[in-house]
Image (spheres, rainbow, N blue to C red):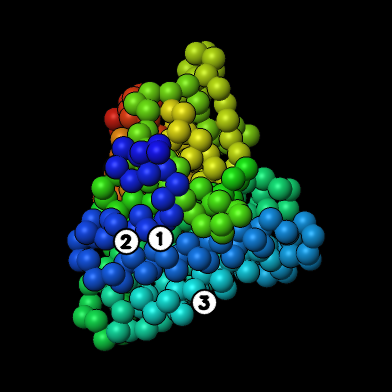
Amino acid sequence: MNKSKLGLPIGTTLDRFIRRKEEEFSFATGELSQLLRDIALAGKIINKEVNKSGLLDITGGFGGKNVQGEDQQKLDVVADIRFTRALKNGGMTCAIVSEENREIIHLNPNCRYVVAIDPLDGSSNIDVNVSIGTIFSIYKRISPVGSPVQEEDVLQKGTEQVVAGYILYGSSTMLVYTTGRGVHGFTLEYSLGEFVLSNDNITYPEDGTIYSINEGNFYTFDSWVRAYIEECRRKQMSARYIGSLVADFHRNMMKGGIYLYPNTVKYPEGKLRLLYECNALAFIAEQSGGVATNGNQRIMDILPEALHQRTPLYLGSPKMVKKAVSLIPADTLIK
Ligand code: AHM
Ligand code: MG
């Protein structure tokens, strides 16, 4: 049998893997394991909807706007409902912060976990059969269990995450997560309807040859970003940009590369959201050997001030990120 580095066979179901690894959770009561299983279950349901989206009338605009003023896709809304329902019914979550909701969603105050989630990221790719993803972070609340959830419970630094992960709805569907002890990847085995271990202890290559950035914004970037891109071009690196953060991240983690979403004229604070997009990927990157920074601060050290706060993001192989941020002029304060 093909054994993984952890001694568990490749093909072990996520369920069994979580049970075997329960001792990894610092406060192993089984609640976190259940919560992770709830997310996986909702992911399988979303996966079904994503797969048949061309057949049903669920692609395209919903007609509404999310809190960022962006058009909501029907599948964005569907995914938000599915995850909220799964977390509510699972009974382990006291509150959710979601890209699709302006305010905190309060669930059972007798629970101790807060979930920050982007239910369906890369929404501009939904209609065109291109990879999309779900991103999630789990935090332990600070205020006492049983009391109403406070802002301080959700505005925690990324360093406080107890679990982070993503689901990639790509050429195959994968769930990748970390509890702070390595990064493990599970592929959805369709005939079983189960996520099974396919990539354990994933290692982010120290260096790489892929750079991922929306180069259409070239002239709106700071000069140091333009200089970095020009260097990538001179070195004939590969430009790869899907426009779905999870897919771009996953490829770069597997092959070695850098993802950049700098501040631009349109997005002076950067586009990506700290709580439910950047922190989870930063945790996974660091756990696998990568780096995540906003240019002058480690992403996970940023103390969030608002639920939907944005940040510039430079994420990837340590050597590449180090090179990129070394070009930032000392007197430039990047937000
Ligand atoms: P979304 O949450 O509205 O889907 O936006 C986030 C997405 C990321 O997945 C992706 O990396 C980025 O926005 C792409 O932005 P752009 O189209 O400006 O390059
Ligand atoms: Mg998003």
**Residue at the spot 23% in from the left edge and 77% down from the top edge:** 143
- Check residue 15 in the rendering and tell me which mark sits there, or answer none: 1
For disc 1, the neighbor class at 10 Å (few under 14, some 14 to 19, many from 20) is some
For disc 2, the neighbor class at 10 Å (few under 14, some 14 to 19, many from 20) is some
Horizontal side of residue 18 vs 121, given as left or right: left
What residue is pinned by disc 2?
Answer: 19
Q: Image quadrant of residue 56? A: bottom right
Say what amino acid the circle numbered 1 marks. Asp
Say what amino acid the circle numbered 2 marks. Arg
Element type where label 2 sits in the image: helix
Image location of residue 32, percent across then percent down: 32, 67
Q: Is residue 43 above or below residue 89?
A: above
Horizontal side of residue 130 vs 42, given as left or right: right
Q: Is residue 8 above or below residue 106?
A: above
Position of the N terminus by quadrant: top left
Disc 2 or 3, which lies upstream in sequence? Answer: 2
**Are the residues at dot 1 and dot 2 in contact (C-beta closer than 8 Å)?**
yes
Element type where label 3 sits in the image: helix
Image location of residue 218, percent across then percent down: 57, 31
**Residue at the spot 68% in from the left edge and 70% down from the top edge:** 64
Q: Marks 1 and 2, how far apart in space?
A: 6 Å
**Whether the residue under disc 3 has CB within 8 Å of ligand 2:** no
Of badges 2 and 3, nearer the viewer stands 2
Q: Which residue is at the front of the view, 113 or 89?
A: 89
Q: Does the image show residue 277?
A: no
**Are the residues at dot 1 and dot 3 in contact (C-beta closer than 8 Å)?**
no
Say what amino acid the circle numbered 3 marks. Arg
What residue is pinned by disc 3?
Answer: 85
For disc 3, the neighbor class at 10 Å (few under 14, some 14 to 19, many from 20) is some
**Residue at the spot 50% in from the left edge and 28% down from the top edge:** 211
Of badges 1 and 3, nearer the viewer stands 1
Disc 1 or 3, which lies upstream in sequence? Answer: 1
